[in-house]
Image (cartoon, grey):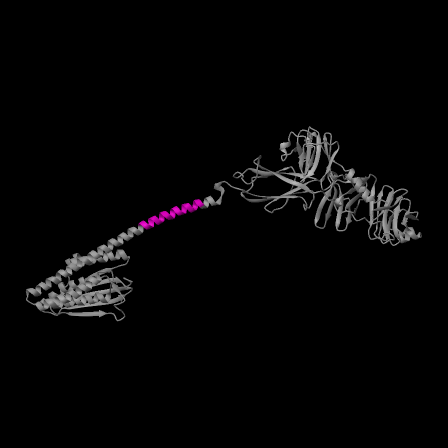
Amino acid sequence: MKGFFFSSCFFFALALNAQVLQRSQGFPADPVTALSWCEDTLYIGTQGSGVFVIEHERIIPSRRFAKFARSIIYDFEECEPITSGTLQSYPIITSAPNGTKYTADDGSLRIEYSDEGQRMDERPSGIWGFPDLQMAPFETGLTFIRNGSELSAYAQNDLIDVFIAKGLIFDVASTPFGLLLSTEAGLYRWEKGWQLRYEGLPIFAFDGPTVRTPLGVIALEKLLEGNWAMDDFSSPSEGTPAQEPFFDVDTIGNTYYGFGPNGLEVFDSTGALFNITSARGLPAMGPGSYDVALTNENLFVATPKGLWVFLNEGKPNDLRDIEVLFWQNGLRIDSFEDLEISPTTIGFTVQQRKVSAGIVYGRYRLNAGAWESFSVSERIILERPAPQNYTLEIQTSTRLDCTQGMNAQYQFTVRAPWYKRIWPWVAIVFCGASILLLRQRKTRIRLQERLYLQERLADAELASKRLQMNPHFLFNALDAISNFIFKNQPKDAVKYMGKLAKMMRLTLDSSRSEAMVLADELELINQYLDLCKLRYGSFEVYWEVDDALDTFDYYVPPMLVQPIVENAVQHALRPVMALEQVAELRIHISLNDGTLSIAIEDNGPGIPKEMVSTGSHGLAIIEERLELLSKKHDQKFEKHIESLSKRGSSSGTHVSLIIPSDFGH
């Protein structure tokens, strides 16, 4: 006997539900003369209007074959139109690789999707499958399909028995007592066909070792023995309710089939896989008993309204060609690559070519966020998008899990006005800070230049003062030499000139820098005092230098101490020597609180008051030098003059210089 499932699939291919495209969907005014499925596209040839294609469930002229716009197309060969030959007669038929069939008739194009279901029977139906049934000669199992009061048995897809029941068919079950069938007329057992085994109390359903009857639940064994009493019945427990929101749930392996108000939902432990709804031929459903069976990749669905069969395990066909239209502020744009600054709205519309009768589901997400569902051909609007970089992902599929379908991804940037961006303000702040720093640098340079000029001027003035002191000393020395010559003392004059030359050499060396080692300054004073002794006669000189003070570690301004010693000799010691008294000069050098103190003390007649207030020319130069040194080094350089009579002594003058101890370092 020919296999039922094979014959049903053949019938199914000839009697699919169909979508019809007519004039309102763009069907050509000229007659259709050829159809060809090629390169994932259906090409439609016409008598005088060229070639058309289907896009988004509409028929439009083909851009690829625009040059044939006024041609008669007789057929297609290797995807190219043929413009000569014999016109084909209606119906003109072609099929896609997935089985979807296209039929052109006069004024319409009929599309019969391969994933639409075929109604095999209109009567209330049920399916019972026993794949593990070990019953000779049906070791591969049996499948029973009920349509109304007719129960058909199949073994390896072959119809082996048809049983017409008297009244309703309730249930089929494999029990310890064999394969049993419960009907309104009684209980049957399979023995090369259904044989009556028990008449009497109807069995509504088998539930393991018990059965449900009008009187309640009773053990199947007790019922078959016939010696039961009313006490053997118990109240039926509530049946296991179907998982919400389904009326009934059937199982094949690890896959669940839930029947609900919106059709049949197929799911597993990971979630929903796909739907079979009225768009694919399944009718609206209500509470009742539903069954499914899977044979040779065909899904059979039994419902109270009939029996349906779906190819490819009921899975919807794949989609083709996703196209995304972009919008900005309500106007179409080519892409999101060149958006305006801070757009008010942006959006997109998805158009999807499909070869499936099922619903196309869409979802999108931004920057890997949560998925948002949308309807294909619906415009999605994003209001006032925040300025940032975006990644837009779009998925469309006929499956709820989106494992098969079309995906698209776009990357774009929404830019804020320049005054709302951080980098322009960073640049402005940077430029402002740069200008401020530049101005401060220029001011600092000018100040440094001014200080440098002031230092140069101070150095020049100091050098000038030193030069003024040298001629003053030289004038006194030359006067002394002339005195020796005038007195006819040539030996003394020569000796004096030798010492003068040595002293002048020391003076020249000291003039080359602004600081002189204290030891060299003391040597210069010694040379000067030797000259004075040659000229004026002998006098006493006492040196008092602190033991802790190393004269080679400290510096003094050159030619600063010598003029004071010179004043002491000229204005103090000589008058004492003229009175034939002992002339004394004391030079005391010490360290006091970070300063170097040099004191010159004589036993002369004392300095007159007018000289203390006005000072000599040499002392005036020293005062100016000390003032300039204080300004230049921002330290105190001081000179003090004191008459010894104030201390209770009879006569004499005390002059002290205060110099910072770190001078010259």
Q: Residue 442: x and y, percent?
A: 34, 48
The percent coordinates of residue 267 (x first, y second) are: 73, 47
Question: For residue 428: magenta?
Answer: yes
Magenta segment, which residues?
427-446
Q: Is residue 271 above or below residue 333?
A: below
Where is the C terminus found, in terms of image quarters? bottom left
Nearest the eye: 604 or 190: 190
Residue 88 or residue 190, whichever sits in front: 88
Which image quadrant is residue 103 in?
top right
Please report the residue visible at 30 percent of the width from the left and 51 percent of the height from the top.
Answer: 449
Q: Residue furthest bottom?
A: 547
The reply to whether residue 298 is in sight is: yes
> Would you say residue 602 is visible in this rendering?
no
Q: Is residue 134 left or right of residue 397?
A: right
The answer to whether residue 107 is above or below residue 38 is: above
Q: Position of residue 640 (x, y in %)?
A: 21, 61
Foreground: 47 or 97? 47
Q: State the image coordinates of residue 256 (x, y, percent, origin top left).
A: 75, 48
Q: Main secondary structure of the magenta part?
A: helix
Tell whether 130 sits left or right of 487.
right
